[in-house]
Image (cartoon, rainbow, N blue to C red):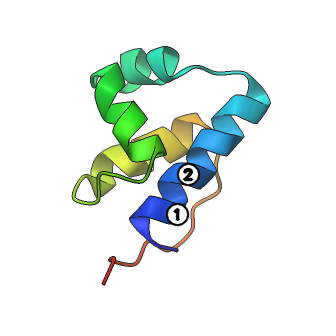
């Protein structure tokens, strides 16, 4: 799964369990705008932030592969 796919999947999962971008941003100490970009699949270099978002959004760990 690419970082972009994982970001969109995390967004869907967060919505399903009722947590907001703001809540995630506060919990993992990043800006809400960065969470938004990751959810839209626009940020590919911040895999550590993506992993934190996925953990917070209770997304099971999947292998992240680079975009080509």
Lateral position of residue 7 relative to residue 48, left or right = right
Left or right for 38, reference 31: right
Crowding near the residue tagged with mark 1, few <14, some 14–19, many ≥20 C-alpha atoms within 10 Å:
some
Q: Residue at x 37, y 27 (%)?
A: 28
Describe the element under mark 1 as helix, strand or loop. Answer: helix
Q: Is residue 58 visible?
A: no
Residue 48: x percent and y percent? 30, 51
Asked if the residues shown at circle 2 and circle 1 are in contact, with their CB atoms under 8 angstroms apart, the answer is: yes
Which circle marks residue 8 in the picture?
2
Residue 15: name its quadrant.
Answer: top right
Q: Eyeballing the image, is 59 above or below 6?
A: above
- Which sits in the foreground, 40 or 20? 40
Residue 33 location, quadrant: top left
Q: Quadrant of the C terminus?
A: bottom left
In percent of width and height, residue 38 lies at: 39, 45
Residue 40 - label: none
Residue at 28 percent across and 60 percent down: it is 44
Identify which residue is drawn at 42% across, 51% down. Answer: 51
**Which residue appears at 39% of the width and 22% of the height?**
25
For residue 20, what is the image quadrant?
top right
- Residue with the mark numbered 1: 5
Q: For mark 2, give the secondary structure.
A: helix
The answer to whether residue 23 is left or right of residue 17 is left
Q: Position of residue 35 (x, y in %)?
A: 39, 33
Within-10-Å neighbours for mark 2: few <14, some 14–19, many 20+: some
Please tell me whether residue 28 is drawn above or below residue 45 in the rendered image: above
| Residue 8 visible in the snapshot | yes
Residue 32 percent location from the top left of the image = 35, 21
Q: Residue furthest bottom?
A: 68
């Amino acid at each position: 799964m690419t970082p972009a796919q994982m970001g969109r999947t995390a967004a869907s999962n967060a919505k399903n369990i009722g947590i907001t971008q703001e809540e995630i941003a506060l919990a993992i100490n990043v800006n809400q705008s960065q969470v938004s970009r990751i959810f839209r699949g626009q940020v590919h270099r911040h895999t550590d932030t993506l992993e934190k978002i996925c953990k917070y959004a209770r997304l099971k760990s999947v292998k992240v592969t680079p975009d080509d």
